[in-house]
Image (tube, rainbow, N blue to C red):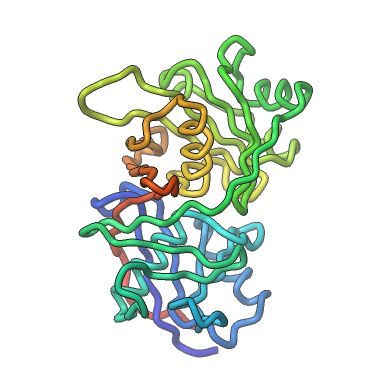
């Protein structure tokens, strides 16, 4: 065991303790898969990351992402939080325009916009859920069939069984049966569109991941990335919008979505460092 530099970062918020926390071990070299997994289980956060030297000549750093239940090839809030921690610790990007993160899903570009970082949403696989499984998921969520506007399985590394519901209030009122969701084996995302308004969020989002050891995730980058690709392509959302997530957990996560002229979706948010120190691993 040795002392390793460590940060705990709050992601998708400019105000500490109002977003989604992330544990970041800044020097993960020499740790086994089992040691990484054990530490991630101990932190009991939705994700813990370990930064490593890149294996690709195109990358600035490499990251491994663990939930309490296993490793993920990609996840959104760990991407933003790890990059924030890497830059804050003195990381210097090779390129002037982008920071390039290497992860199990491949290379992910990030860009800076003032204090905000945004990642390029990775390629998305979409599939229609079977009516039988959709009915089971809706039952576990406690929603009626009439409240489900659309459903899709969105897979950009993690796979989210995603339901678009009839109103933000329906989303906020959900009280799921987490054991049923866990037994179904799906991570479930839900969202609803706000009526057009001059200020405030445009989309309300919640994420239930009992299948990965997290009953509800406070703010979820991968889900929001998939939602943006799905809903913008369906002309349900504009090319630039703001998503809110975490209200039911007393959080105030804000996810900034933009589709650029080339059609690339960018998922952005601010981060705040809460803890800086060392960990014995």
Q: Residue furthest top?
A: 146
Measured as percent of width and height from the top left, residue 106 is found at: 58, 66
Vertical side of 239 occupied by 76: above or below: below
For image coordinates 63% across by 31% down, the residue present is 152
Q: Position of residue 92 (x, y in %)?
A: 32, 80
Quadrant of the rendered structure where residue 91 is? bottom left
Q: At x 48% / y 29%, what residue is drawn?
A: 191
**Res 281 seen here:** no
Report the front residue among 252 and 64: 64
Q: Is residue 49 left or right of residue 237?
A: right
Closest to the observer, 142 or 166:
166
> Is residue 47 rendered to the left or right of residue 244?
right
Q: Quadrant of the N terminus?
A: bottom right
Q: Is residue 249 left or right of residue 117?
A: right
With 22 as the anchor, is 208 left or right in this view? right
Question: Which residue: 28% across, 59% down?
Answer: 272
Considering only vertical position in the picture, is 175 above or below 159? above
Q: Looking at the picture, tell me which residue is in the foreground, 81 or 17.
A: 81
Up-down relation of residue 203 to residue 225 (above or below): above
Figure check: 40 above or below 243: below
């Amino acid at each position: 065991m040795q002392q390793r530099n460590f940060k705990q970062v709050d992601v998708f918020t400019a105000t500490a303790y109002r977003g989604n926390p992330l544990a970041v071990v800044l020097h993960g070299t020499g740790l086994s898969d089992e040691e990484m997994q054990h530490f991630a289980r101990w932190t009991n956060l939705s994700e813990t990351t370990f930064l490593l030297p890149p294996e690709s000549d195109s990358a600035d750093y490499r990251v491994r992402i663990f939930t309490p239940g296993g490793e993920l090839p990609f996840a959104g809030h760990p991407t933003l939080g790890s990059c924030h921690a890497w830059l804050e610790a003195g990381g210097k990007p090779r390129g002037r325009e982008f920071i390039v993160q290497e992860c199990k899903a491949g290379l992910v570009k990030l860009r800076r916009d003032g204090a905000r970082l945004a990642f390029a949403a990775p390629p998305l696989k979409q599939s229609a859920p079977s009516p039988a499984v959709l009915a089971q998921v809706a039952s576990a969520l406690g929603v009626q069939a009439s409240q489900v506007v659309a459903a899709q399985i969105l897979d950009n590394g993690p796979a989210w069984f995603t339901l678009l519901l009839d109103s933000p209030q329906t989303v906020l009122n959900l009280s799921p049966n987490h054991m049923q969701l866990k037994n179904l084996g799906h991570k479930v995302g839900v969202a609803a569109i706000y009526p057009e308004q001059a200020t405030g969020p445009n989309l309300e989002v919640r994420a239930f991941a009992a299948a990965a050891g997290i009953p509800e995730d406070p703010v979820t980058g991968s889900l929001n990335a998939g939602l943006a690709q799905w809903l913008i392509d369906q002309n349900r959302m504009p090319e630039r919008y703001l998503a809110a997530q975490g209200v039911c957990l007393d959080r105030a996560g804000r996810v900034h979505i933009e589709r650029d002229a080339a059609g690339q979706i960018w998922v952005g948010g601010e981060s705040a460092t809460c803890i800086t120190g060392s960990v014995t691993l």
